Amino acid sequence: MASKSICLYFQVHQPTRLRLYRFFDIGKDSHYYDDFANRTILRRIAQKCYLPMNAQLLQLIQANKGKFKVAFSISGSALEQFQRFAPDVIDSFRALAETGCVEFLCETYYHSLASLASESEFTHQVLKHKKAVEDLFGVTPTAFRNTELIYSNAIGEMVYGLGFKTMLTEGARHIMGWQSPNFVYGCDTQPKLHLLLRNYGLSDDIAFRFSNQGWDMYPLTAEKYLAWVKDSARNDDIVNLFMDYETFGEHQSASSGIFDFMKALPEAVISDGTFSFVTPSEATKKYKPVADLDVPDPISWADEERDITAWLGNELQQEAFNKVYAMTEKLSIVGDPDLWEDFGHLQESDHLYYMCTKFFSDGEVHKYFNPYDTPYEAFINYMNVLSDFQIRLDEKRAALDVKEAAVREVEAAPVKKKPAARKTPVKKK
Amino acid sequence: MFGWEFPPHIAGGLGTACEGIVKGLAYNGVETLFVMPSASGDEDQSATTIINASDVAVDTVSETVEEYLDKVKFIHIGTNMVPYADPEEFSRLVDEDRKRQVKDFSISYGQKYKFSGKYGANLMEEVARYAMVGGTIALQRKDEFDVIHAHDWLTYYAGIAAKELTGKPLVIHVHATSFDRGSVDNIDTRVFAIEKKGMMMADRVVTVSNLTRNIVINRYGIDPGKVVTVHNAVDFSGRENLVVERGVKEKVVTFLGRITYQKGPEYFIEAAAKVLKRTKNVRFVMAGSGDMMNRCIRHAARLGISDRFHFTGFLRGADVQKMFALSDVYIMPSISEPFGISPLEAMRTGVPSIISKQSGAAEVLKYAFKVDFWDVDAMADEIYALLNYPALADFSARAGFDEVNALKWNGATAKLKQVYESVVK
C-alpha cells in the first residue's frame, strides 16, 4: 500500500422543498411540502447523476479489486425521498455498500443546523440517521460529517461523545493559516477525535471549475489532475477530496466529460502508485494527527467566508432559526410523531439558505440552488408554515393539559388509589 | 371626463373613484363621456360612455397642424432635458425641437397610438400623447359636452388641451398630489410641474379632502377661492359580505395597501411589537406590496415578531375581501393620505378601523379611531383596546358600518354638479 492517500467523499442531499404556503392557509392546511417539485427534481437528478454514477462507481470498484474506495454521506431527507420517489437509487447504493469498499458516514438526519442550536436535538438526529443507515445499508457508520461540514471545538466534543472517532470538515484558510490540510489533525478540546480536512482547491477543481471553459486550466484530464494532487501532497499524507455528489451529471453535465474523467482517475492514481484510496475511517487509522486544531467559532465549506453566514448571516435567518428551535421544549413535552417529523423537515438548513442575502460574492451559487425569487419570499413562506406548525403544537399541548386535568380530578377523588405516575412533565404557565 | 383607468382593470383607487363619480353623476342627471387611454371593452358603461383613446387617431377637424400645435405647445413628447446649454445653443435646440415636433406630429398625424394605460417607464410619453388624443376627441365631440373634468395629473394635459381647443371650462380633480407620493424634499419635479400647470389652468380644482385642499393652496399656490373639497364616497352596491372560515384562532390586525413610505408601514410594525409585548392572542398582517416591503420584512424579523407578523404579498379581487373578512382591526397609519378608501371598505365589512389623522378619510369618519401616524404608543393602545374590550369593538363595528353606508357618491356628486354649474356660463 502506498504511503500517501486520497480520500474521496461525496455528499448526497435533497431538501424537502416547501410549497407556496400563504397566510390564508395557516390553521387550515398542514401539508407543507411541494411533493410535485420534490419528486420531479429527485427523479431528474436520479436519472442524470445518482443512477449512472453509482453504476460507474460499482464498475470501477469491481474492476480495481478493492483498490478504489469512496465514502458517502446521504442525508435522511434524501433517503426518504429515494424511498418514496426512486427506490432503485437505494438499491444501487446498497450494491455499493456490499462491495465493502464504500464507507457510509453519519450526519444529522435532516441536514440541519441542530449542532448550533440544541445538543439534545442534535443527538436525536445523529442517532436517527445512524439507525437509518444501518437499516438500509447494513453498515454502522463510524465517521461523522456535520451539515455543510460545519465544525467547531464544541461540536467536535459532542460528536466524540456520540461515539465517533473521525470527523470531516473544511480546511478553511483562516483556521489553517500556514498549515496544510493534507494531514490528519486532532480536535483541540477533544484530541481523541481525529479530523479530516477538505482540500478545497483540488475539490473545487472538480466540483466547480471542471466544465468552465474560461478557466486557464481547461480542460481537466486525469493525468493533469493527478500531477496537481502529487504536487499538493509532496510532503504530506493525505488529500481529502470532498464534494457534492450531484457534481457528477447535475452540476457538471455528462457532456462536459465529467464521467469519463472520473472513470480515468482511479486507474491513473492506482497505476501511478504514489497514492492509495482510503475511506475516512481508514485514514484516521492509517495516520496519526500532526497537531490539534483550535476552532472556537463554527466553520463550514460554504462560500468564500467558510463560516455559517450563508444560513445565519442576516436577521431573517436568525429570526427563523430562533423561532424554530424555541419550540424544542414544548415538542418534547407533547411527543407527537407527526409533529416531530415536520419539525425535522422544517429544520433543514436549505430553508435558511434560501433566505441568504449575500448576493454579491456567491450569489450565483445561491441562486442555482434556490426555488424562490427573493430571500424575502423564502422567509415569508417559511414563517407562514412555521406559524401553522406552532398552532398545531399549541393545540396538542392544550389537549394534553385537559387530559392531565382529568387525571388530576380522578386522583383527587376520595377513592384510595396509588396515583398514576405522570408520563410527561407539566409546564407551568 | 378624462381618466386613466376604470374598473375592472385597475391598479389603484383612482379607477374605482371614477366609476363611483360617473355613476353618481348619472344619478344626479349629469351625462358623462369618459375618456381613458386603454379601455378593454369590459367596463360597465351603464352610467357613462367610454371612449378608448387608443382607438382615436390624432386628427383635427377644423384647424391646421400649426394652429393645433400652437394651442397644445406646452406638451412635449419624450424627454428632452438638456443640461448646461448656453443661450444660443439652447435656442437652437428649442428651434430644432420645434421642427422635430412638427415633423413627428405630421408623421403621427392620422395615426392611432396604442396606449398601455399602465404606469410604466414611458409614462411621461403616454401622458403627452394622451393629451394630443384628448384634444382631438374634445374637438370631435365639441357639441356634446359643457365641462371638461380631468382626474389626477396623468390627465391634466389632456384637460388643458381640450380647454385650449374648445374653450370649455376645465375642472381638475386632485385625488393625490406629489407630496403624498414622496416626502416634501423628495418629489418628482416633472409631475409637480404638470400638477401646478393643471391647477393654474383650471377653472375649478376639486380636492378629495380638506387635507389635500390645504396642500393645493399652500404648496401649489392656488387661489383658495377656486379650490373645492368634495369628499370621496364608496359604492357598495352588489357587495355581499363574504363568509370566510378562519384558520387562525387569534385576532387579526390588518394593514392593506401599497407598502410605501407614504403609507407609514413601519409605524404599524412598531405598534405591533408593542401590542405583542402585552398579549399573544393576536396576529398582524401586512397585505400588499411596494418598495418598502423588503425593508419591512427585515424590520419585523429584527424585532423578533415574524411568527406573529405576516406578509401576504399583493392581493387582488376576492382575496382583498377575504382579508377584510378575516380581520378584527384594520389600520391605516398613512403619513399623508389624500383620502384613503380602504378603511371605508374595512368598516363596511364590520371591521373597526384605526386611521391616521393625516388622512382625508379622518375628516369624514366619525367612528374610526384616529391617531397621529407617528404616535405608535397611541396606535398600540387602540389596537389593544379593540382586541380586548369586546364592547368597544362591537360598538365601533356597528356604528362604523352604518356610517360608511351613508357615505354615498350620490351625495358627493351632487356637490360636484354644483361645481360644474358654477363654471358653465
Image (cartoon, coloured by chain):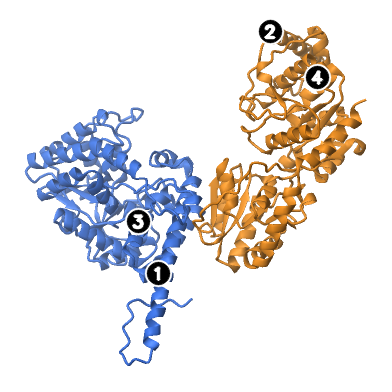
Chain colours: A blue, B orange
Percent x, y of residue B200: 86, 30
Tell me if mark 2 has few (under 14), some (14-19) or many (20+) residues whose alpha carbon lies within 10 angstroms of its own. Answer: few
Give the amino acid type for the residue marked by disc 2 in the picture: Ile
- In this rendered view, identify the residue nearer to me: B45 or A164: B45
- In this rendered view, identify the residue nearer to me: B347 or B280: B347
Q: CA distance from mark 4 to mark 1?
A: 76 Å
Judging by the rendered image, the residue that carries numbered circle 1 is A329
Tell me if mark 3 has few (under 14), some (14-19) or many (20+) residues whose alpha carbon lies within 10 angstroms of its own. Answer: many
**Would you place residue B297 above or below residue A368 in this image?**
below
Percent x, y of residue A68: 13, 44
Q: Which comes before the other along the chain, label 4 or label 2?
A: 2
Specify whether disc 4 shares its chain with disc 2.
Answer: yes
Query: Could you tell whether B73 is left or right of B17 in the image?
Result: right
Judging by the rendered image, the residue that carries numbered circle 4 is B144
Q: Quadrant of the N terminus of chain B?
A: top right
**Would you place residue A230 above or below residue A125 in this image?**
above
Subunit that carries the residue with mark 2: B
**Would you place residue B360 above or below residue B302 in this image?**
above
Secondary structure beneath label 1? helix
User: Are the two marked residues, 4 and 3, in contact with CB atoms closer than 8 angstroms?
Assistant: no
Please tell me which residue is depicted at 55% across the width and 66% down the height of the picture. Answer: B280
Q: Which image quarter: residue B73? A: top right
Percent x, y of residue B204: 87, 32
User: Are the two marked residues, 4 and 1, in contact with CB atoms closer than 8 angstroms?
Assistant: no
